[in-house]
Amino acid sequence: MTPDPRYGRATASSEERRAAVERLLAEAGLRPAGRRGRVLALEGLAARMARSLPSAGPVFAAFGRYLAGRPDAVPAPACLELASIPDRGPAMTAGALAACLQRELGAEPSQVFTGLEPRPFVSRLWTQSHRAVTAAGERVVVTFVRPETDAALAADLPLLPLLLPAVATLDPLSHPGEVLEAFRRHLESELDLTNHAAALAALAAEAPEMLVVPRVEAALGTPRLLVREDLGGRPLGEAAAAPTAADGGDAVRRTCLLWLRQAFVGRSCPAELGPFDVEVLPDGRVAFVGGALLRPPTAVQEHLWEHLVATLADDPATAGERLLREVERQPGALDEADLVLRMRQVVPFRDGAWSSSGDSLAEQLFAYWRLARECGYRLRAPALRTVRGLAALALLGRRLAPGRDALREGVEELRLARGLGRLREAVDVESLGRELLPYAHLMLSLPQKVDALLSMLARGEARVRLETEERGRPGAGGAVAVAAAAIAVALVLGRVFEPALADGAGQRIAEGASALLLLVAGGLLLRAASRSG
């Protein structure tokens, strides 16, 4: 097979390859011309990078996509432009496919798979996936790292410094090579498919019912090969764009909710979700099928979650205070109080946003993160990995559901679910039963008391007693009214909050809250009945 020129030619010398890349970047306006210095114009720079980097090869395309996930270093509009770089690669020939699989499996592919579709299910920059059937009759998806990847990395990783002028223009505060080195570490993790297998295994161990995770065939896996269960779904990007999709935006919203839940409530989640890392199943459920493993420390989860909620509530003081817990102060940084003051003054549509209104949650967050860097504060590594995951999620939502704020919806739903979860924990029906046991005889007489009370109300007798109550002492009528309201809320609570979580947790939480309200109502009615008897 003739190597794709974008993946580097084994026959071309390093000098020839460097000259070709320099020419391409200069023609695209990504390299300073002549002796004008090493500063480029920021206007239109990200758009030029998005158009030109794919032509320079997968290393440059992947680097552009990496920059899209650095909202602390790159302006929000540039993040959106760079996120448009396609994660696509050319399909391999059947012969190259067979040779690649034989090398990874250590056997003829036909001995392991009775059926292997020659056409790729997904063809990405670094990997290719095919549907297959194992010898045991199980339907699987076979994903492998392209065999030409090593040649591309050897040829083009040393050439990435050619983009330093463009990087310095996007992020004037970056140290030389800082972002390039971070990208190398990111690429090393992404290209090791055992990281993806570990992420799926960790997710499967704790995933809620609403999240589907495919089973991994660990015995067939290698650092360059991943075999996982075929769930029969479609990539999220394809499903959301389908003309027949009932509501692609809803699938994006559920994706945001599920990732947020795993990142801030669970123990593990995919590091960065792309449109090929999520599948929508025929029954509408969402499945996470790819992405390296991210395990945010508990402190990072708590601080960044409180930062998200404060941003959602338009509370920049709290948002800044929580963010400060996950940053490192650099020499010459502003005082923390000055940073919080400047966060109060942030207006995304003025200070860098991808829309004219700048009112989405992601745009506000991106503005905060970039401002912190500009003021001399840098995210610590664990927090940066979570922020990159949030950025990927926000950009995915913006790309696939531009008409809605999917990240905001996901944070709001998770906030509601966590609040109801705490309420459910507080409502321990068994302990409440033990506390109410001494009053069992009163509860047994409650129907008769209520019937007598309602009869008095109907005859107007309760009104007389209400009027003779001591000033400031609640009357029976007020207690009955409050009790009736509590009962009404309890009856409708299940229907109001049941959609909060699609796995049925919303219904269980609402039932607990309803039980609490009914107990309160019963207490109020008992009190009113005792005063009226």
Image: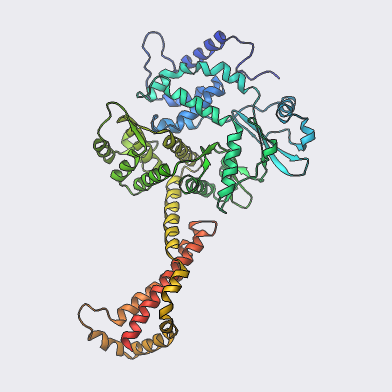
Give coordinates of residue 19: x percent, y percent. 52, 10
Residue occupying the far left of the picture: 471
Is 240 drawn above or below residue 51 in the view shown? below
Give coordinates of residue 335: x percent, y percent. 25, 34
Quarter holding residue 101? top right
> Is residue 121 found left or right of 483 in the rendered image?
right
The residue sitting at 35% across, 84% down in the picture is: 529
The residue sitting at 34% across, 43% down in the picture is: 322
The residue sitting at 62% across, 48% down in the picture is: 281
The residue sitting at 77% across, 30% down in the picture is: 107
Name the quadrant of the N terminus.
top right
Q: Nearer the viewer, residue 232 or 30?
A: 232
Residue 487 in view, yes or no: no
Is 59 drawn above or below residue 76 in the view shown? above
Give coordinates of residue 167: x percent, y percent. 41, 22
Quarter holding residue 490? bottom left
